[in-house]
Amino acid sequence: MVNKRVPDWLNSSLWSSPQPPPSPPPPSPLSAVAISDPPLLIPPPAAIARPSEPPPPSSSSPYAHAPKGENRDPLTSSYANNTSVYCTDDDEDDGSPSYSAPSNGGDSGAAAPPPAAQDVSRQAQILQELSRKVINMVELRKLASQGLPDGAGIRATVWKLLLGYLPTDRSLWPSELAKKRSQYKQFKEELLMNPSEITRRMEKSSLENHELEAGSPGFMSRSEISHGEHPLSLGKSSVWNQFFQETEIKEQIDRDVMRTHPDIHFFSGDSTFAKSNQEALKNILNLFAKLNPGIRYVQGMNELLAPLFYMFKNDPDEENAASAEADTFFCFVELMSGFRDNFVQQLDNSVVGIRATISRLSQLLKEHDEELWRHLEMTTKVNPQFYAFRWITLLLTQEFNFADSLFIWDTLLSDPDGPQETLLRVCCAMLVIVRKRLLAGDFTSNLKLLQNYPSTNISHILYVANKLRAH
């Protein structure tokens, strides 16, 4: 039986570069992430357990954060690591199918325009598409899959369209946005209220009704005060009992938000701006937990929320930026709905659970590079759960710097079939690209490499992932 090997197009010198020394990961681990099925249908699940087999002593936890860069704004600086590439390097002709590597000249062989010119051209195309009365989502997804420019609020608007928050008919945008933002304001007023205020309003309403019935002012009798309104009530319907149960979740959210991207001033620091952004993240996560009792909140959701809020808050349109919290909430709900089955513990062993998803990644690698699959899983015994669990559940937000994560999300969100399949192809491409190092490694070195993925050209990863779709 002939093992499938990596195709020749991956061996092009176009992707080659010197290998930089790997950076050691920080010691603090990130807990597993879970998410629910639709609200009220599933009881609150516990967080998915970590893999039972411990990682090697010299490696990081499979849930640890990837190394972060220095503290700065990812979209206004050039700190994105897009210059260093680890590529496959099989010198022998293995007889595998041959594919053309991307050429600077395209099909005609003419010289390609410089990257800046390409970006301007693509930005013009996207702006033209967004200016249509009715957005052509097929064309917009095609453009977005190549990566979105950072300027002119393009990514914020396109993400809202890709997530279904904005309708394709532009004439409906003002009314839809006004309705959603008003709804979010109502959610905050009703669900983020302190029980003391809730009780006070209930008492005021009851007192007003009593006065209307009696025809004269008066005080509520002791028997008229509901037991559920008492702070010591243990009843399930008691607003105080619910408040105390939710305190633990609120405290966990507070801790996680404080740890969100400590290397980026937007999220971290003592400035008024950073503090207000942290409060917005807390509000969104607390509301999500209250409105989704089947899952509430688990660690890691803050990492998926951060890219959305960052993009919407940095929208150059002042009205949109001012309403970033509301817009982010609804887009976050849409994003979670597409991945919920991976995070529900009750579904772990089902055909739609996280273990099945990881198995699909393993099968995808076997189909495209059986030699690498056999070495990882049969020879070195590297269980895919040790690295792929975090890759999949956190949508690669911890494997690359923030700016690169946004670029990857452009591709994930633009897939008309949903982001799950594209995510698996990207993960498979990440394995294939570092195959030479993996084939030369043992359990310890391979696990360390995959838990602390090296600096890589993101465009290369997405190019390879797209090739895997076609072959």
Image (cartoon, helix red, strand yellow):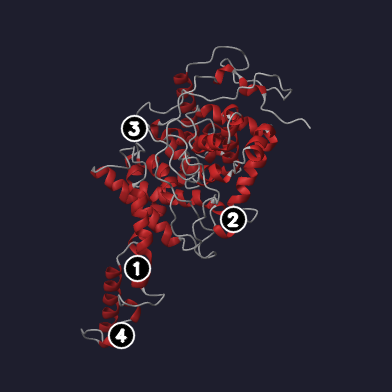
Type of the residue with mark 4: Glu
Q: Nearer the viewer, mark 4 or mark 2?
A: 2
State the residue at coordinates (33%, 42%).
267
Local packing at callout 1 (Cα closer than 10 Å; few below 14, some 14-19, many 20+) is: some
* Residue wearing tag 1: 244
Question: Is residue 185 at all visible to an observer of this figure?
Answer: no
Using the image, tell me which numbered label, if any, was put on residue 272.
none
* Residue wearing tag 4: 224
Q: Quadrant of residue 440?
A: top right
Q: Secondary structure at mark 1?
A: helix
Q: Nearer the viewer, mark 4 or mark 3?
A: 3
Left or right: 392 as drawn, with respect to 219: right
Give the Cα distance between marks 2 and 1.
30 Å
Give the Cα distance between marks 4 and 3.
60 Å
Type of the residue with mark 2: Asp
Give the image location of residue 258, x and y in percent: 32, 48
* Residue wearing tag 2: 348
* Residue wearing tag 3: 70
Q: Are marks 2 and 1 in contact (CB under 8 Å)?
A: no
Decide: is 230 above or below 181: below
Decide: is 291 above or below 382: below
Q: Secondary structure at mark 4?
A: helix
**In the rendered view of the protein, which quadrant contains the C terminus?**
top right
